[in-house]
Image (cartoon, rainbow, N blue to C red):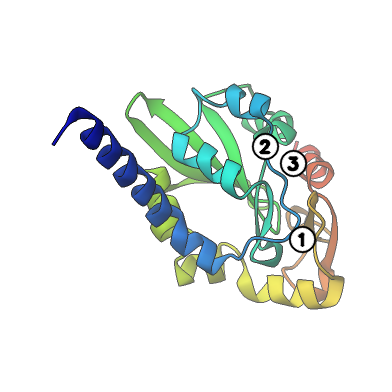
Amino acid sequence: MGLFDKFKKRKINKEYDENVTFSHFINTFKPSNNLLKPTEEELKQFKNSLPTELLNFWKEYGFGNYGDGIIKVINPLEYMENFYEWLGKENFSKIPIILTAFGDVFYYRKLQDDVEDICLLSIHYRNSIVCSYSLQEFFKSYIVNEQIYNEVLRKKLFQQAYAVKGSLELNQIYFSTPALILGGKELIESIDRGDANIHQSILLQLGK
């Protein structure tokens, strides 16, 4: 096999791996029709901070609602300021990549050159946990797991909110009124919808 043939084979294998990584995710969470593609400048800003597979996914599909909005693939630039306020400091090894319909944040964490994980910041219960130990594991296994779908993404409550409050805009999430931190309940009667950044900021201030 010649050098060029070896290069082509590696490229094909890499593209296949990326397709496998995201195929179940796309089948589970159908992309909306109004996704926004990243600019070349935005892609350049994250070239050395996020996995190439994720940047390629952005280019192919875009930012916005997936699965009718039960999760959002987000442009980190629009949420990093709020996110770092929640963390208490700027830390560019941690980058928000996905929001749930209720505003919780999945973020990518680069620990070392070859060590990474995906964590979940719960803005309602004010804790952070490790979900997966690689981007591939997160998209192929974790986020499409039925238990995660039901418990972490709150599938039943989401479906009720979607039916009663309507679909979410690109910048919106559902939230409880009063907030859970103030004794609110995860019931459809308490659910409203609004701007994700604003509500995340309000919840942060309520907890101080």
Classify 10 Å Cα crowding around label 1: few (below 14), some (14-19), many (20 and above). Answer: few
Mark 2 lies on residue:
38
Residue at x 42% of width, y 53% of height:
19
Disc 2 and disc 3 in contact, CB within 8 angstroms: no
Give the secondary structure at mark 1: loop
Instruction: Work out which residue is located at the far left of the displayed protein and give it.
Output: 1
Residue at x 72% of width, y 68% of height:
186
Against 126, residue 28 (above or below) is: below
Which badge, 2 or 3, is on the more N-terminal residue? 2
Against 104, residue 79 (above or below) is: above
Answer with left or right where residue 157 lies relative to residue 148.
Answer: right
The N terminus is located in which quarter? top left
Which badge, 3 or 1, is on the more N-terminal residue? 1
Q: Residue 101 falls in which quadrant of the image?
A: bottom right
Q: Position of residue 124 (x, y in %)?
A: 68, 52
Mark 3 lies on residue:
207
Give the secondary structure at mark 2: loop
Task: Determine the CA span between mark 1 and mark 2.
Answer: 39 Å
Mark 1 lies on residue:
183
Disc nearest the viewer among 2 and 3 = 2
Disc nearest the viewer among 1 and 2 = 2
Task: Determine the CA span between mark 2 and mark 3.
Answer: 33 Å
The C terminus is located in which quarter? top right
Q: Does residue 118 appear anywhere in the picture?
A: yes
Q: Position of residue 25 (x, y in %)?
A: 50, 60
Classify 10 Å Cα crowding around label 3: few (below 14), some (14-19), many (20 and above). Answer: few
Name the kind of residue labelled 1 in the image: Gly
| Rendered image: mark on residue 29 | none
Name the kind of residue labelled 3 in the image: Gly
Task: Determine the CA span between mark 3 and mark 1.
Answer: 12 Å
Name the kind of residue labelled 2 in the image: Pro
